[in-house]
Amino acid sequence: MLKDITLGQFFPGNSPLHKMDPRMKIIISAIFIVAIFFAKNIFSFALLILFSLILTTLSGIKHSVILKGLKPIVFIVVFTAIINIFWTKGETPLINFGIIKIYPEGIYTAAFMIIRVVSLVVGTSLLLSYTTSPIALTDALERLMNPLKKLKVPVHEFAMMMTIALRFIPTLIEETEKIMNAQKARGADFESGNLLNRLKALVPILIPLFISAFRRADELAVAMECRCYHGGDGRTKMKILRFSVFDFVWLFVMLIFSVSVFCLNYIPTTIKLSF
Amino acid sequence: MKLTDIRLENVSYIYSPNTPFQKEALENINITFKGGKLTGIIGHTGSGKSTLAQLLNGLLKPTSGKVYLGDTDIWEKPKEINKIRYKVGLVFQYPEYQLFEETVYEDIAYGPKNMGVSGDNLNRTVSEAADFVGLTPDLLKKSPFELSGGEKRRVALAGVIAMEPEVLVLDEPAAGLDPRGRTEILERIRNYQKQKNNTIILISHSMEDISEYADEIAVLKNSKVLCSGTVDTVFRNAELIRSNGLAIPKITEIMLELKHRGFPVSDGIYTTSDAHKEIIRLINSYKKNGENNA
């Protein structure tokens, strides 16, 4: 069912990750991403895994949820791993089938690639999507992009559009389901026939969906005007974001982590990587 | 036309089973909707009315239990569930939001076309359906989006009627219409049922509407059938319905109150015209008594 798709899968909670200022989360995620791409040897990768595990434990999010979140990237991960295994050249091949040669370097590269992608997804989704509500996230983005206002970038408008878009995703999913059911009751068939027929079968869903989306947009615009919405100027916030000491501790930890990743790269190892 | 019963046997339905969002919408429902009758289903929001409607035409598959249309289990051949959907027409809440074609005619013809009806037969069934819901032929050439809210609703209704279903299920057909629109659409449904003599299931939360138009009533409460039967028998249980937090028709409430105050009025009065007769009878009997005493 369409409803089972989880989008912006926020899990309310009270963990240290939940309590962090969303702006700090964005900054920390950025540092984390950079650190991931600095990691180059087995020690720095070990630290990466350790850090991801610590984040997982601190967040209090169930492991099954995190594993489920990794499903969409399984294909990419497997694909890049296979490419790495077969295409990385080394000195002495581990397996030699004539044309196909597998080098130990290839396997290491593939393994590190997997760790890299998985910790990237786990880390950022723990910091951003699982523990931060979409509203807090757009609010934080707006604050962080505030300096761009000087360059006449309509920051507030972008943030508002994002908030509204996020807000309406579940509504539209529900609406799609309703319309699909109504057309099914009139004998519409979405599951059989060739591609062209299936595309044609979408018309009776898309047209009512567009019409209702426009209607909703119109109603929302009127409702916003009734409440004197006139953009971001002079608008006050109910929740004012303030950095706490705690947030700076996080920043500090994160910086130490990245520096360590960077330094660990210099410990000599026998495993050679091709990146 | 043959009369088709539709029967639910120990039907339960659970939304998102085995997840934290698990919710039991219907629990062990046993009920028969009699062929050729207009049955009203009534209950609070969240009592499982709409789930029940979708179980009847196979949009939802019961988690356990069976749904029979006539003598056939509708899920016997899951691949042919579409055939069941042709036999059991379902009109959703606010069906006007499902209109999409360029003309009213085309929109009404969408269902029959999916069934493989064409040519003269299609023409006949569309104009017949349009006639049943009171759409004039000149409206058929218009775009459905030019019509008024009430007209759109009737187009959507015609779209299902045109499929000539044996059983017609209507989920809140009068919701959001003004009083005149309500009476009009409900009258049309009643007349359609009388002419076609087919089975109609009308879901509503207005006791007034149900008592006025239905032959039988089923009351749903917290995913279960609280009581069911003819309008008479159900409203004889007015106290039970009221104690379960459901409104009974205003007129029945008045009659109950009269009874509480010691007037010998009969139970099971739920339309204004019946109440009128009853009160006249009562007054006459008092007059008689008065004359006798004098």
Image (tube, rainbow, N blue to C red):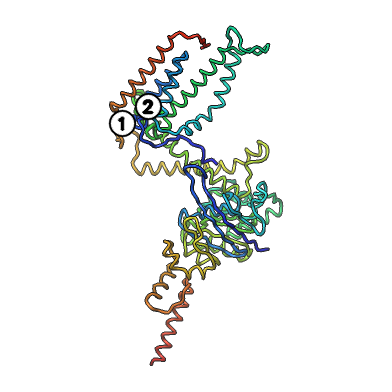
Name the residue type under label 1. Answer: Leu
Name the residue type under label 2. Answer: Lys
Residue B1 in view (yes/no): no
The Cα atoms of the two marked residues, 2 and 1, are separated by 12 Å
In the rendered image, the residue lying farthest to the bottom is: B294
- Give the labeled residue for mark 2: A25
At a point 68% along the width and 63% down the height, the residue shown is B2
Task: Tell me: A92 left or right of B42.
Answer: right
Residue B277 in view (yes/no): yes
Quarter holding the N terminus of chain B?
A: bottom right
Count residues near mark 1 (Cα–Cα under 10 Å), then give few for <14, some for 14-19, many for 20+: some
At a point 47% along the width and 40% down the height, the residue shown is A170
Contact check, label 2 and label 1, Cβ < 8 Å: no
Q: Quadrant of residue B250?
A: bottom left
Name the disc covering residue A35, or none: none
At a point 47% along the width and 34% down the height, the residue shown is A65
Quarter holding the C terminus of chain B?
A: bottom left
Chain at numbered mark 1? A
Numbered disc in front, either 2 or 1? 2
Compare residues B145 and A63 and report the one nearer the observer.
Answer: A63
Residue B103 in the image: x percent, y percent?
60, 48
Chain at numbered mark 2? A
Residue A261 in the image: x percent, y percent?
41, 15
Determine the secondary structure under disc 2: helix
Instruction: Please report whichever mark, 2 or 1, sits nearer to the chain's N-terminal start.
Output: 2
Determine the secondary structure under disc 1: loop
Count residues near mark 2 (Cα–Cα under 10 Å), then give few for <14, some for 14-19, many for 20+: many
- Give the labeled residue for mark 1: A241
